[in-house]
Amino acid sequence: MPTLTEKKSIRPASRAQGRPAPELIFGDLWEYDPAPETADPKLKARYDLFIDGRFVAPKSGQYFDSINPANETRLAKIAQANAADVDAAYRAAQNAYTKVWGKLPGRERAKYIYRIARLLQDRAREFAVAETLDGGKPIKESRDFDVPMAAAHFFYHAGWADKLDYVAPGRRVAPLGVVGQVIPWNFPLLMLAWKLAPALALGNCVVIKPAETTSITALKLAEIFQDAGLPPGVVNIVTGFGDTGAAVMGHPIAAKVAFTGSTEVGKIIMRSLAGTDKKMTMELGGKAANIVFADAPIDQAVEGIVNGIFFNQGHVCCAGSRLLVQESVAAEVLAKLKNRIKVLRVGDPLDKNTDIGAINSAEQLATIKRLVAAGVKEGATLYQPPGVLPAKGYYFRPTVFSNVSMSHRIAREEIFGPVLSVLTFRTVDEAVEKANNTAYGLSAGVWTDKGSRILKMSTELKAGVVWANTYNKFDPTSPFGGYKESGFGREGGRQGLLDYCQLA
Amino acid sequence: MFNEIGPVDGVGIEERVAKYTTRSIKKNAKLFGLKLATSMVDLTTLEGKDTPGKVASLCQKALSPHDDPSIPTVAAVCVYPSMVRHARRALGSATPVRIASVATAFPSGQAPLRTRLAEVRAAVGDGADEIDMVINRGAFLAGEFQLVQDEIVAVRETCGPATLKVILEVSELETYDNIRAASFLAMRVLRPNDFIKTSTGKTSLNATLGNNQVMIEAIRDFYLNTGTAIAMKPAGGIRTAKQALQFLVAVKETLGDDWLTNTRYRFGASSLLNDLLRQIEKERTGAYQAPYYFSEAAESY
């Protein structure tokens, strides 16, 4: 009789006779009906620039289309700002800083920031639908993560605004002045909140440029600024493409620039700002290692792997895109992972049951396809679960590459899509070596039942955040930022505030 | 044993099951789920005050839960051993509803083994199709795993052709690691389509999505490893149709379509049935019925 203490493999007769191995059937016996979120996103047909507290037409008169990546239809026309518009935005910000915002006591600033947070909560569903339409992320993520977290960041930093004496004990803090910020398209509203909230809490004024594919929620938030009575010019939003971003980063009034985006663009910005006295923070790309040891709780690790790489279609700078798994459990982890991703639902982002929505843009989809093709060509083994993708829109199946080695492009370059590369290791040292053998260093994950190993790994991994037995956990109180080519400066927590002030 | 089957992370399990509760089940999918859940109910009465009359009316409810003929019968009635013969008389011999009986000194299991086996023998002799046994939690917590397993084997042998359901009483095992270990302990000596079951319903905490997830993941791992399909029965605490659908979503996304049948999955419940019927009627008519059509209390079946 098999017992608990002696391991006994029970091979049923069916296996011995060479019948197929048992499999789970994830079929259509019980299909979920469509469950679309129906709240009205209250979109305008045309969005102007938000400068000095008002919506103003761009000086060039030019607008570009914002596309819904789920079905390739136009959502709205967005104003395209040129250097003159950016200049107007900076002058408005400078004016607001010297005359109003920089002089307000912290407790008064806090009232405005609290008001913004509350108004955002009031309109949470509307913002969630707008975010999903504009960016393609599943409604359950925009509803349960993006919008609540954005509000949380405003709340948290509002709380700091009258307690700035405690940011750097023994020293006094002062605002920097006007800061220029450029944010990416993967978390349009949340990145906006990450950038604005600490800047405003410390008394800075802001010129910010959202990404060209996802400008809508930023401009909707401008409506909230108006409703909250935020003094004109404190926040100015200029929309447009790379040239607009360059104008925001390079403007002489900017005392500091903050950028979140690709390492490639980050390097261009840093080169262009060499020789100026602007302060800088950069939050750039990543190629995080998610490390699974043999003693890990495997099912929960698989869940964390899925959360790490398929959250927001993998459009996450801290995505766990390299899975390092100990060789003795590699086959088991891979088998469980394949079974798990069979039940991920890819499709209409507005459907409440969708797990993986649309890729943000046609360009990004092309990038993902190019890198996946490179992975196949270099000899990695590709697995994608079966299933039908919508005919229109930019979609990509969750993809797992096994038999990947460190020299493969898919193990080195940031794919920024739902593509996981699985590598193996044998010892702890090898895991650390492989995890750190990358130009990036934004995040890492460790899965083990052994607490001492977690502590050891957290000191040896060169990554801004190391998650233990979990992944993709964020909190306004927790600083976030990178090592090496993943950038510098921190966002969130007390450390994040230090990047938006000068110490005296 | 614990090393071999691997640990369970409690935080991770609870995050996983929280995702099931965000699934939005609408229209036809909802109706299908509600009827499926109805067909999986083990309609239960386990009280000191049970009488032959109460059991007879429970059996009538089990046979025809509602006057709508498209609604299936429930899977089984679940009663104490002394009520088995009354249930058999009420249901007759040619009936789709099976008779399940708790046995082995339910719910504590604190009786000599031969007493417990005699109880099983009596229940089967009176016509029980299924036996719900409790494991020896005292022995499990004392580390006497072999004893626990030997007792399960003894009950299995005594059951004869009757289906065996092994109640782990998860709230007394306390940790997810223990629940996973106890699941394997039982599954390794069970026959295909025998059950493992969460609870007696007699403790404060019974079936939860977390406990259910740990057990169905154990069933999945065991099946993929050995080819032996074990069935699952959460019991106690599932009172609403909404909860039942969440449990079924967990089954669909963990074990797949083969477990979406009442030979592989059951709900041990009493008041759940009327909420399922109420929701089915609401889907059919588009409006909730007056509360006195569907009683909250299982006493009035």
Image: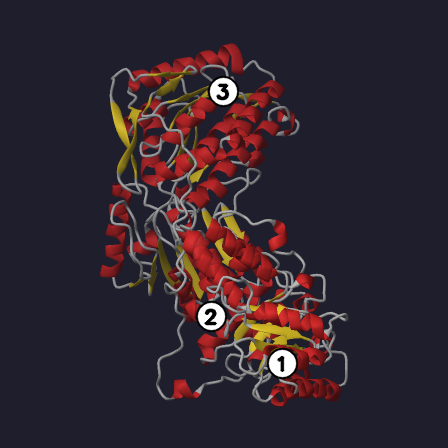
Res A227 label: 3
Along the horizontal axis of the image, is A493 left or right of A95?
Answer: right
Residue B70 in view in this figure: yes
Q: Quadrant of the C terminus of chain A?
A: top right
Q: Which chain's residue wears label 2?
A: B
What secondary structure is marked by label 1?
helix
Does residue A443 sit above or below B248 in this rendering?
above
Q: CA distance from mark 3 to mark 2?
A: 53 Å
Residue drawn at (63%, 23%), measured in percent from left and top?
Answer: A162
User: Could you confirm whether marks 1 and 2 are on the same chain?
Assistant: yes
Q: Hey, what amino acid is under mark 2? A: Trp
Along the horizontal axis of the image, is B55 left or right of A357?
Answer: right
Mark 1 vs mark 3, foreground winner is: 1
Does residue B114 sit above or below A336 in this rendering?
below
What secondary structure is marked by label 2?
helix
- Residue matched to label 2: B259
